[in-house]
Amino acid sequence: MTARLWRLAAMMAVALSVGPAVAQFTVLDQTQDGETAQRQETAPPPPICGTQPVTVAKMAWPSAELLAEIHVRLLRQEFGCDVSITPGDLAATGSSMGSTGQPAVAPEMWVTRIADVWNAGIEAQMLRPAASSYVESQFEGWFMPDYLAAEHPELRVASNLADGLSAVAAKEKLRFISCPVDWACAVINRNLITALGLTDLVELVEPANRFEMDTLIAEAVNLRQAVLLYYWQPNAVLAQLNFVPLDMGAYDQEAARCLAQVVCASPKPSAFASETVVVALAEWVFTDIPAIAAYFQRSSMPLEVMNGLLAKLSEPGATAEGVAERFVAGQETVWRAWVGAGAG
């Protein structure tokens, strides 16, 4: 055999010996790829609450305390979250959320009262609202006892008061219990009485302070007197004494601006201004744990429900923790819609 033929035979032998090895590597690669894909398909989903604790700010007033305690319990019970409470107040909590993303949740943020801090956090894309804390957005208004509303349902509409009170208070003026004289609401109430044509039909009472205001209201109810009053929500008094709100009509910005002035040349009726009160979330809650963000986006509470909770909180020995536990145990019809289908 010539040298050339020897070289050809050697090359063929090498080729034959390499072929099966290449095929073997190909089979191994395919097997490994299949195992990797299988591991990826069977890998558990990321935790619904993420991998870091969820902190909830507990503000220092009763309704905010209750909301914090309620949400902590529901996040633990329905989602299995590692969640904790941290003390807070409007300005400090808003500033911290806007700069560090902590705490993760502020359930009752009155944003118009810290507008600069809030807007800075929004612009930095560090926080944003999830939902309104309450279903309703008007927190101030006029109210009447339930017994008066039952006897004279026509009085539940403010625009009907002039005609209705002419019959109800035919012999003497009906008392209107306003807020303390140095509060801004006192000015608005005076002008509203004029705007609604009630000057000759009601006796305006402006108490010296909050304590006297509540005392006058309680005394009127105990005596079952026909009385109207100004108040705000959420508040235990409205639930404890069974007051119902009046329909104040539509909000008129120009009319409301004049009603707030000590000298309003031509008062016209308007509802009280609404206020923005939201469940605030750190931005990372929306991006990292969207199921929890969705829970808070559904978590608006009716003011009437909160008023009832505040009434329970005012009972001797009651605590925010205890009232929250009673709410979670007994009012699933309220909070079940918040949880939705995302709970684990």
Image (cartoon, helix red, strand yellow):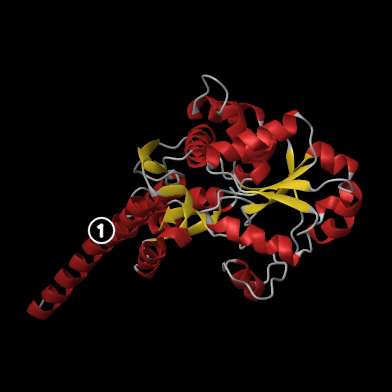
Look at 44% across and 48% down and name the residue there.
106
- The residue nearer to you, when weighing 56 against 48, is 56
Residue 333, percent from left and from top: 70, 37
Residue 229, percent from left and from top: 69, 47
Look at 79% across and 36% down and name the residue there.
225
Q: Residue furthest right?
A: 167
- The residue nearer to you, when weighing 149 against 278, is 149
Q: Secondary structure at mark 1?
A: helix
Q: Which picture quadrant has residue 119?
A: bottom left
Horizontal side of residue 49 vs 162, given as left or right: left
Q: Which residue is mark 1?
A: 21
Residue 6, percent from left and from top: 12, 73
Q: Quadrant of the N terminus?
A: bottom left
Figure check: 274 above or below 46: below
Residue 153, percent from left and from top: 88, 47
Number of residues whose C-alpha sits closer than 10 Å to that of mark 1, classed few (under 14), some (14–19) or many (20 or more): few
Q: Say what amino acid the circle numbered 1 marks.
A: Ala
- The residue nearer to you, when weighing 76 against 255, is 255
Figure check: 66 above or below 129: above
Q: Is residue 31 visible?
A: no
Count of marks, rendered view: 1
Q: Residue furthest top?
A: 317
